[in-house]
Amino acid sequence: MAAIGKRAIGKRAIGKKTTGKAIGNSGQVKHSGSRRKARIFAFQALYFWESNRVPVEELLTFAWVEEEKIKKLDDSLAAFSRSLIAGAVENIKKIDKVIQDHLENWDISRLNRVDLAVLRMSVYTLLFQDDIPPSIAIDEAIGICREYGTDDSFKFINGVLDSIRKTLQEKLNNNSQNKA
């Protein structure tokens, strides 16, 4: 099994690296974007799954990742990544239908694998992770696409996810009005 390393898929073999450090309220340096690492693992797992159709159990063990990279992922981030992976694969038919319904004059089978993996992960979050604001899910997807996708991937992903977000918000608003 081939290991997927940072920037091993997508347009860039190497690229910029940011520290993601911020100063917290306590004055201590905090690492922002630590969930970004978990999302990148999830995105890579979904990319790997689309390419190889391995059982989800294999994805959840991170057997496809270089051992050094796994060691850098703490338990809570690994759990978050696993929830994204398992949730997306478990709900893949619903997720793919939502994606297809928001593609204008385009078929999901024509999407490149990077875009598809990012969309699947992000749509899972929009549909099933109520504790994560849609703006965070979309911003994270855009960031991952800027790093791993083609030059215009982030624009495409933003458009599709924002359309899905609006549809979900409209349904929520309609449900609220119907209950009142």
Image: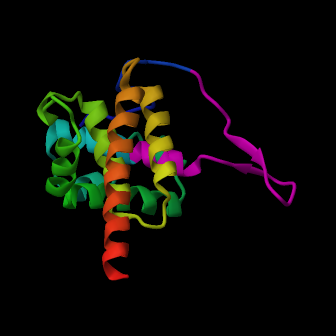
Q: Tally the marks.
A: 0
The image quadrant that residue 24 belongs to is: bottom right
Q: Does 10 appear above or below 34? A: above
Reply yes or no: does residue 90 show up in magenta: no
Q: Residue at x 60, y 27 (%)?
A: 17
Among all residues in the image, which is located at the extreme right? 27
The image quadrant that residue 158 belongs to is: top left
User: Is residue 64 in sight in this rendering?
Assistant: no
Q: Residue at x 14, y 54 (%)?
A: 93
What's the image's color scheme?
rainbow
Q: Does 178 appear above or below 107? A: below
Question: x and y percent of residue 170 in the render?
Answer: 34, 59
| Depth order, front residue of 9/97 | 97
Question: x and y percent of residue 138 in the render?
Answer: 45, 44
| 59 with respect to 43 (left or right) | left
Q: Residue at x 31, y 53 (%)?
A: 167
Reply yes or no: does residue 22 show up in magenta: yes
User: Is residue 85 in sight in this rendering?
Assistant: yes
Q: Quadrant of the C terminus?
A: bottom left
| 101 with respect to 34 (left or right) | left
Question: x and y percent of residue 71 in the render?
Answer: 51, 50
| Depth order, front residue of 24/76 | 24
Q: Which residues are magenta?
A: 16-41
Q: Residue at x 20, y 61 (%)?
A: 90
| Depth order, front residue of 8/99 | 99
Among all residues in the image, which is located at the extreme bottom? 180
Question: x and y percent of residue 176 in the render?
Answer: 37, 74
Q: Quadrant of the N terminus?
A: top left
